[in-house]
Amino acid sequence: MSPIIRERLQAFPVALKKQGELNAVITDTSSQALEQLDASPDGPLSGLLLAIKDNLNLVDTPTTAASRTLEGYVSPYTATAVQRLLDAGAAIAAKTNLDEFAMGSSTEYSCFGPTRNPHDHERVPGGSSGGSAVVVATALVEAALGSDTGGSVRQPAAFCGIYGLKPTYGRVSRYGLIAFASSFDQIGVFARSTELTAKVFEVIAGHDPLDSTSADEPVVHFDYSEERARGLTIGIAPEYDHEGVEREIRERYHDLIHFLKGQGLTIKEISLPHTAHGIAAYYVLTTAEASSNLARYDGVRYGRRVHAPANLEALYTDSRSSGFGAEVQRRIMLGTYLLSAGYMDRYYIRAQRVRRLIQQDFITAFEEIDILVTPTTPTIPFPIGGKVNDPMTMYLSDVFTVPMSLAGIPALNIPAGTGANGLPIGLQLSANYFGEETIFQLSRFLEQNYST
Ligand code: GLN
């Protein structure tokens, strides 16, 4: 075992303290990692310091999901993806801050307080995996895991200026990930290079008998080829390029397309006509799934339990009302309403149909193109406090990431320089199902050849 990793783990608490105000970490696990260092196997991630979002289980360690309801919970087991990191030789130094139960786009809805953007402390780092994005962006660790239900890896990666991958749905086992919306949730990777993003992805991906939705599809090893990258057909879509997108982001997007054209790649305009309905369908389906997934935190089976309630009903309502924050409560109520008798057809079933149409848009598009290039977000990182009291505006910040989540296709945020005020700009590369390797080809090509 490399002596450097021991030193870095020993120095970790001090390094963490130095960035205190950023509030990116919930639990420092470096001493636990230090104890296990001698038993750590040699593997593709040996010598690397990693962090995981605090909705992923690591045995004998608290999992909070940034919620009061899980106060005092210590996990009796380790998530499959996390176990695979450990088996590959990685040391896990920290569990990172997030929006409560991964519901949010700014990491402000955490019972531990907001995480701050390292490029401007008065702005949000994105969410919900904001803590993981920040520890990677500030080089406290090499890579981190997050979870992405509608953009929670890609959007914070864009706001912090790093790579952030949401794999194909089912690519990575969800066993040990706290469920938000099970037909969307996918564990993703943050890193500062394409190569390491791909490496961590290869370690965590692959079938797991403990998750029946995990795909039994071989994981292709990423082997960069400039020739293959130059042969790709790139799709652009007008639905992602309009007035509603901040000028600097659009300019960078056009600059990148111009560059690819100049390099001889084929650029094709395609259409994704149902894009505009993505946000509505996403917030119907995910709140419905959340209301059912979060029913288990009732103070009996799981979660905070109030002391001496007046009766059984008070046990449930008081426990849940004091355990969940406002945004989580809003989503549970919305989801429960949408699923109630008489409304199910009107909202839930209709949203499922829209989901299918969005999926079909992508399937048709990928008959003609290899990679779709879009902005990751319509805006640059917004000020802390700017959207917390306006859930609709907050929801709209996911407009470019939820369509891929509805379809279940893979997508990667790549850093594309900074704007005039020094804040990062991110662009998104999406591919057909199980096309992660193709995404990495283009990402690596840009990393080597494109400068902003
Ligand atoms: N921001 C989106 C939401 O609030 C996505 C969250 C996520 O991907 N976990 O639902």
Image (cartoon, grey):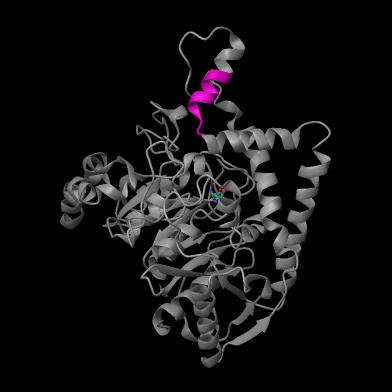
What secondary structure predominates along the stretch shown in magenta? helix
Quarter of the figure that contains the C terminus: bottom left
Please state which of residues 150 and 385 is positioned toward the viewer in this rendering: 385
Per the rendered image, the range of residues in magenta is 317-325
Residue 302 visible here: no
- Residue at 48% over, 39% down: 100
Q: Quadrant of the N terminus?
A: bottom left
262 lies above or below 60: below
Which residue occupies the foreground of this view, 305 or 144? 305
Judge whether residue 201 is colored magenta.
no
Q: Residue 29, image x and y in percent?
A: 28, 41
Quarter of the image where one finds residue 62:
top left
Q: Nearer the viewer, residue 257 or 420?
A: 420
Q: Is residue 140 above or below residue 443?
A: above
Residue at (21% x, 46% y) in the render: 17
Asked if 424 appears above or below 448 in the picture, the reply is above
Task: Name the residue rendered at 60%, 56% in the picture.
Answer: 396
Specify whether 66 is left or right of 246: left
Q: Nearer the viewer, residue 108 or 303?
A: 108
Residue 96: x and y in percent read: 37, 45
Q: Is residue 67 visible?
A: yes
Whether residue 318 appears in magenta in the rendering, the answer is yes
- Picture coordinates of residue 345 (x, y %)? 83, 41
Answer above or below: position of 452 versus 64. below
* Number of on-image labels: 0
Residue 66, position as x, y percentages in the image: 43, 37
